[in-house]
Amino acid sequence: MSRVWNFSAGPAVLPEEVLREAAAEMLDWHGSGMSVMEMSHRGKEFTSIIEQAEADLRELLAIPEHFKVLFMQGGAIAQNALVPLNLLGGKTTADYVVNGSWSAKSYREAQRYCTPHLAAGALAGPFRGVPPAPTFQLSADPAYLFICSNETIDGVEYAEIPDLDALGRPGVPLVADVSSHILSRRLDWRRYGLVFGGAQKNIGSAGLTLVVVRDDLLDRASPLCPSAFEYKTVAANRSMYNTPPTYAIYIAGLVFQWLKRQGGVAAIESINIAKARLLYAYLDGSGFYGNCVEPEYRSRMNVPFFLKNELLNELFLAETRAAGLVQLKGHKSVGGMRASLYNAMPIEGVVALVDFMKEFARRHG
Ligand SMILES: *Cc1c(COP(=O)(O)O)cnc(C)c1O
């Protein structure tokens, strides 16, 4: 068996240790004589799995008690609809900062449910930074302010999360799509009303969507919100109103335990900083490659880069694949290459990529 260095933006690399544990437990989880996939979601075995996963997540992210953790389905794209359906509470507008492809998509989905207001940014790229919070133009009475704090496609990450108290709007809840950097860095819960993310980037396998929502926001759902997607209903039933994505929750739980063994979020955050530094420093110094994002807003998780001679793109991709460095092709809207450096990508993988890039530049420069 040989494993590659997988730079996919998602579904993405998982810790090898987690995959080995899941494999060892596949046929018989902890003496139950069953796979996790075959268990009743209401039985004592699975109850212990979901409760441990929630407790570990709360510990890793220091989630305060007045926030609920919901294990949902539908992905982050479903949340683009579920956020307005759950949070508008009869209001007719919500504010959006658009600084990348995903927040643009969130804005457009919100148009089905309200008249969203563009508080900062633009609906079309190129996206190379984040508008500073003091320049946000909030509307008079928005239901919430929406941001995507790490734009996976454009490689743009908020250097600092907007503080609505400091902006003089303490009553406006901040909603953040954190799909592609959750658990890569610490979160200051005083700034957020709700965060959500699909699991397939930095948590586990596809099929699970995590929502963390402040208690006081649970009472605002539209009567048209499907019961299975109403945060209050999901919370009241501890994510068991209907059958939750049991196997994906189990995998997420193994990843949370792995993360605790690495020293937790602060420890993985320093490794993520070192990984990103290594690649950006090489890109900036090379002359052969480049990156367009303003340095302050460069994502630690998703690094888009390009070859100055684009005629070499196909050769670069073919040779990286042959060298066991895969899924480096950039998103079609940005072009070039993209390396995603999620928690489960060890620094050795980034070293291997940079070494290959140096060698390729030497041969073709
Ligand atoms: C991947 C991604 C999405 C889409 O998630 P789905 O699970 O496909 O719905 C949305 N937002 C961000 C920031 C993402 O990285």
Image (cartoon, rainbow, N blue to C red):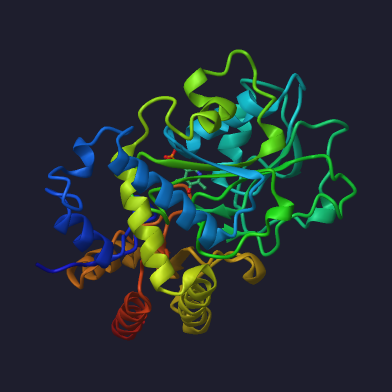
Q: Residue furthest left?
A: 1
**Quick check: 41 left or right of 2?**
right
Of 118 and 225, which appears nearest the observer?
A: 225
In the rendered image, which quarter is residue 325 located in? Answer: bottom left
Q: Quadrant of the N terminus?
A: bottom left
Q: Is residue 350 among the parts visible in the rendering?
A: yes
On screen, residue 146 versus residue 341, left or right, reads right
Residue in the image at 78% along x and 57% along y: 132
Percent from the top left, x then y, of residue 350?
37, 76
Determine the residue located farthest toward the top in the rendered image: 223
Residue 160 spot, x, y in % from top left: 70, 62
| Relative to 139, 355 lies left or right | left
Q: Identify the residue at horizontal 42%, vertical 34% (top origin).
A: 73
Q: Who is closer to the viewer here, 352 or 230? A: 230
Q: Is residue 47 above or below residue 221?
A: below
As rendered, which of 87 and 145 lies closer to the eye? 87
